[in-house]
Image (cartoon, rainbow, N blue to C red):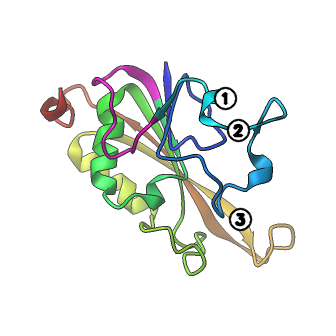
Amino acid sequence: MKLDVGCGHRFSGDVNLDLFIEATHHRSLNQRKVDDKPLDVKSIPNFVKGTAEDLPFRSRVFDEVVCFHTLEHIPNVGKALRELVRVSGEVVRIVVPHRLGDNWLVKKDHVNHFCPRWFRGLEKLGLKVGVELRYEGFPFRMLGFFLVPKEIHVEIRRAKDDSLTHNHE
């Protein structure tokens, strides 16, 4: 079973969690359609209102937890990561903008700015972490003169002896 944390209008999980689905500058109103109907929480399968920092689920209940373009908005990212790992039985997949490709001067709601080293630091906690960078041409996608990091794709798997989940069970 798959949990999508921060699902918004592009939900992909068997269970989909978000604090809100309203339009923001990240989510435009014209994208908010499911089967050509306006999007509301009733049209999102198994929608749960909540935050990544306090997931209302038992430990290890989901095979896969995905969190795409959400962690950059969360004030307590460490707590959110512990929660993602806690409810995952197998793997956590995360996608965040790279700090160099984030355009953080424009996107004021991004409270965290990431680089691959930040996620590799999680290995000190006994987690298996895979990190892949995705690049984009600069100054334009099609006519880029050189490549800059755009997104960080992270896969986290728990170690055999995982102390991160013991304090929440």
In the image, the segment drawn in magenta is 49-64
Q: What residue is at 80 percent from the left and 67 percent from the top?
A: 141
Whether residue 55 appears in magenta in the rendering, the answer is yes
Q: Position of residue 43 (x, y in %)?
A: 66, 29
Q: Image height check: is 155 above or below 109?
A: above
Asked whether 109 or 117 is in front, the reply is 109
**Labels 1 & 2 near each other (Cβ < 8 A):** yes
Q: Amino acid at mark 3?
A: Glu
Q: What residue is at 56 percent from the left and 81 percent from the top?
A: 105
Viewer-side label of 3, 1: 1
* Neighbours of disc 2 within 10 Å: few (<14), some (14-19), many (20+): some
For mark 2, give the secondary structure.
Answer: loop
Separation of residues labelled 3 and 1 (CA atoms): 34 Å
For mark 1, give the secondary structure.
Answer: helix
Q: Position of residue 118 (x, y in %)?
A: 37, 60
Camera sees residue 121: no
Q: What residue is at 66 percent from the left and 40 percent from the top?
A: 10
Query: What secondary structure do most residues of the magenta stretch adopt?
Result: loop
Q: Position of residue 125 (x, y in %)?
A: 22, 45
Q: Image height check: is 99 above or below 53?
A: below
Q: Disc 1 marks which residue? A: 43
Q: Amino acid at mark 2?
A: Leu
Q: Disc 2 marks which residue? A: 39
Camera sees residue 92: yes
* Quadrant location of the C terminus in the rendered image: top left
Q: Which residue ends up furthest to the left in the rendered image?
A: 167
For mark 3, give the secondary structure.
Answer: strand
The numbered mark, 3 or 1, whose residue comes first in the sequence reads 1
Separation of residues labelled 3 and 2 (CA atoms): 31 Å
Q: Amino acid at mark 1?
A: Ser
